[in-house]
């Protein structure tokens, strides 16, 4: 029974996050330039992507379709399907990492309006990479800095969207 509920966790969380983003974007002002996307466009576009992913994962969970790594949906192992196993050890070990990732992203989103995005975004990306198991120094430095540079160039420079810059 528990494995059956676990397979619905990811689609449910994705759908809830998408719903929160859509509800939050309802308060955004309309576009100042006729015909141009307003400030709510990108958050709603991302929310639509999250809903699409939630739909795919939900359909997979409903059908019990195996995941791409060959493991049955819901985290059950082949032995669990036969009733001889006790659960996937890998998934039990991944739970703290998933929880750490959720805490890191939630902390970044809560502190985001009060912090300097360019200073805190590399910390978020580095922590997420470390939680995923990356231990090499070069990627732990290069990827967060490259991603932060990409965000700065795209949003600040290309789109003219100011990123939060005040440090408490």
Image (cartoon, rainbow, N blue to C red):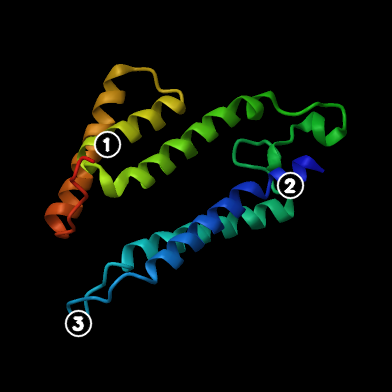
Residue at horizontal 77%, vertical 32%?
A: 78
First in sequence: mark 3 or mark 2?
Answer: 2
Tell me: residue 38, above or below residue 104: below
Where residue 116 appears, as percent x and y from the top left, is: 21, 41
Q: CA distance from mark 1 to mark 3?
A: 34 Å
The residue to which callout 1 is attached is 120
- For the C terminus, the image quarter is top left
Say which of 115 and 39 sits in front: 115
Residue extending furthest toward the top: 136
Position of 55 compared to 34: left or right? right
Image quadrant in which you'd find residue 46: bottom left
- Residue 153 x/y as whole percent: 15, 48
Between marks 1 and 3 in the image, the one whose residue lies nearer the viewer: 1
Residue placed under numbered mark 3 in the picture: 34
- Picture coordinates of residue 87, whole percent (x, y): 75, 29
Instruction: Mark 1 or mark 2: name the one nearer the start of the chain.
Output: 2
**CA–CA distance in space, label 3 to label 2:** 46 Å
Quarter of the image for residue 26 reads: bottom left
Within 10 Å of disc 1 (Cα), the crowding (few <14, some 14-19, many 20+) is some
Residue at the outermost left position: 157
Q: Residues within 10 Å of mark 2 (few under 14, many from 20)?
A: few
Task: Give the secondary structure at mark 3.
Answer: loop
Marks 1 & 2, CB-CB < 8 Å contact: no
User: Where is mark 2, residue-wise?
Assistant: 5
Badge nearest the viewer, 1 or 2: 1
């Amino acid at each position: 029974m528990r494995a059956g509920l676990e397979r619905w966790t990811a689609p449910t969380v994705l759908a809830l996050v998408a719903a929160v983003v859509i509800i939050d974007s309802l308060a955004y002002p309309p576009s100042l330039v006729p015909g141009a996307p307003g400030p709510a466009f990108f958050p709603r576009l991302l929310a639509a992507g999250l809903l699409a992913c939630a739909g795919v994962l939900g359909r997979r969970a409903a059908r019990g379709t195996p995941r791409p790594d060959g493991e049955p949906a819901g985290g059950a192992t082949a032995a669990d399907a036969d009733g001889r196993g006790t659960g996937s050890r890998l998934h039990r070990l991944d739970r703290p990492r998933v929880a750490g990732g959720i805490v890191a992203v939630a902390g970044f989103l809560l502190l985001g309006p009060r912090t300097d995005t360019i200073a805190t975004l590399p910390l978020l990306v580095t922590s997420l990479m470390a939680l995923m198991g990356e231990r090499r120094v070069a990627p732990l430095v290069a990827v967060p800095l490259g991603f932060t540079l990409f965000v700065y160039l795209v949003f600040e420079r290309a789109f003219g969207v100011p990123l939060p810059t005040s440090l408490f």
